[in-house]
Image (cartoon, rainbow, N blue to C red):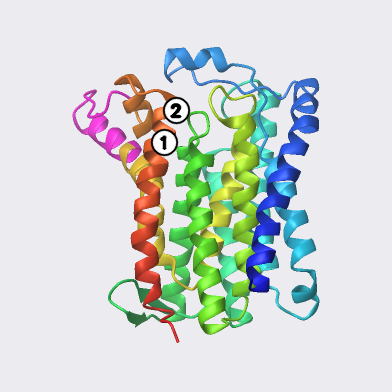
Amino acid sequence: MDPIIIKLLAAVVLGFVLTAALGKVVIPALRRMKAGQSIKEDGPTWHMAKQGTPTMGGVMFILAVIVTVLVLNASAILAGDLTSVFVLLFSLVFGLIGMVDDYAKIKKKENTGLTASQKFLLQLAAAVLFTVLLRSFGILSPNLYIPFLGIEWKLPWVVYMIFAAFVITGCVNSVNITDGVDGLASSVTLVVAVFFTACFTYAHLMWNTTGSAGMAVFAAALAGGLVGFLVYNFHPAKVFMGDTGSLFLGGAVCGMAFALDMPLILILVGIIYIAETMSDIIQVVYFKATHGKRIFRMAPLHHHLEMGGWSEKKLCYVFAGITLVCCILAFIGVMGRFPAL
């Protein structure tokens, strides 16, 4: 068995075990802190029963990913391969923004934390810093690879940076919007993490691409951590990840796509994130244009389906299944960038 496969298995197991073990400590601690989720009054009425469920539970898989990546990638990091460290730090910055937002919500006892402009500016700064860092270390190129077509579109760096900032802030907030029912963001992002594990492993085995082995470990650790989190987060949820977890996940998804140097792949692997966000945008625009009419029963999309009779478990299964199909298609598109030797 190839050493990278053994390391990936270790990453999944360690990520799972650490997250599951942390749940036994973190959830009671959050209850003692009275870190309960405040439910939006304009959301589905039956969600009010979740009022007070501990939030900020994302720290469980965040800590697990940190430990797993630093332990299993230690030798590569010391040898100068910092790609996984950059992506980890990038994800942590977004997780920290989410933690500040969660704390503000808990302190005010309502479902509003940082203002939209505050979050946007912080996220934009993180996005710009991350792309500059990847460019400085030669990890990122301005060549925009178009999956399936096998061609690259070279952009001026300034244009690419603007594009990257738009994609990152949009994607991170889309993952955040998807986190609206028990286990949804966790299960969908689990599939995405497995996809990136396969991509980085393929890039490493076929072309020995710099940083790909370390990034495969990062993605595998995230997948294992999310499985561990779903032990507590699947319906009925004992804990919510909060913005702490969802913004970390958004940062991780974007970080992996840019570390792979193929951000356009997010269109396929993030199809659920996009659908959730677009349903929200369409609802608001249509509501304002028609002076009160709605297209969806309630936005975002998962609430529309809930009000149509879908259970939270069904939403997780269907949305994760759609993501899986799109990830398989995306992997076919990725193979054009890393053809077999």
Report if residue 83 is visible in the image.
no
- Give the residue drawn at x 62%, y 80%: 136
Of 32 and 221, nearer the camera is 221
Q: Position of residue 197 (x, y in %)?
A: 55, 62
Quarter containing the N terminus: bottom right
Residue 295 badge? none
Name the element at disc 2.
Answer: helix
Q: Which residue is mark 2?
A: 313
Q: Name which residue type carries label 1.
A: Tyr
Vertical placement of 298 versus 7: above or below?
above
Q: Quadrant of the C terminus?
A: bottom left
* Amino acid bearing label 2: Lys
Residue 335 at x, y percent in the picture: 39, 74
Callout 1–callout 2 Cβ contact below 8 Å: yes
Give the residue at mark 1.
317
Q: Is residue 177 above or below residue 134?
A: above
Measured in 3D between alpha carbons, the distance from the residue under mark 1 to the one under mark 2, in whole angstroms, is 6 Å
> In this rendering, would 151 be left or right of 134?
left
Q: Is residue 89 visible?
A: yes
In the displayed structure, 136 sits above or below 179; it is: below
What residue is rendered at 44% in x and 70% in y?
262
Range of residues picked out in magenta: 280-298
**In front here: 213 or 133?**
213
Image quadrant in which you'd find residue 143? bottom left
Residue depicted at 39% across the width and 29% down the height: 314
